[in-house]
Amino acid sequence: MYPNRSIGSTALKRLMTEYRELILNAPEGITAGPIDENNFFVWEALIALSIESPTMRFTCDFFHPNVYPNGTVCISILHPPGDDPNMYESSSERWSPVQSVEKILLSVVSMLAEPNDESGANVDACKIWRTDRNRYDEIVRQNALKTLGL
């Protein structure tokens, strides 16, 4: 199959190593491997995708410009895939099946550090964030203490 045997041998070793890695550490929703274990050069793969965007909700009282009063988080990465009907976000900022849990959580941490009061889910939190930061901080502090049972 290969005029240079060492190239074929190297490729086979690499494919065998990658197959072993896929078996031991398969990414969620992906199954792949050779169709026939006697021929590592012909593979098949199954990729299971969910096109529905996940939701995230705080279960305690949470006062934040980008969190609806019911606790649902409103950030671009959790918005349904495709173009934004309001043309505020690009499709690359919205949900896609390649997003990881880690990326979603990092987006939430970023949201907590830097609220987007231009696209608020909680109008009252947006107003107070803009006009009275001390009052906003006190409401957040009180909610945290309440959640901790203090």
Image: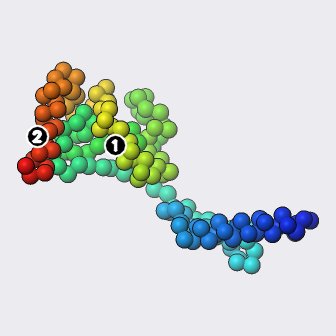
Residue at the (25%, 39%) spot, across then down: 67
Q: Is residue 50 visible?
A: yes
Q: Which residue bears the numbered disc 2? A: 142
Camera-nearest label, 2 or 1: 2
Q: Tell me if 46 is positioned left or right of 53 in this view.
A: right
- Percent position (x, y) of residue 63? 18, 38
Question: Under tag 1, what secondary structure?
Answer: helix
Residue at the (70%, 78%) spot, across then down: 37
Residue at the (19%, 42%) spot, across then down: 62
- Percent position (x, y) of residue 77? 41, 42
Residue at the (13%, 28%) spot, across then down: 135
Q: Is residue 9 above or below residue 64?
A: below
* Label 2 vs 1, first from the N-terminus: 1
Looking at the image, which residue sits at the far bottom? 38
Q: Is residue 44 above or below residue 66?
A: below
Disc 2 residue type (three-letter): Gln
Q: Which residue bears the numbered disc 1? A: 108
Q: Is residue 10 above or below residue 123?
A: below
Disc 1 residue type (three-letter): Val
Q: Residue 96 got which mark?
A: none
Looking at the image, which residue sits at the far right? 3
Q: Tell me if 136 is positioned left or right of 33 in this view.
A: left
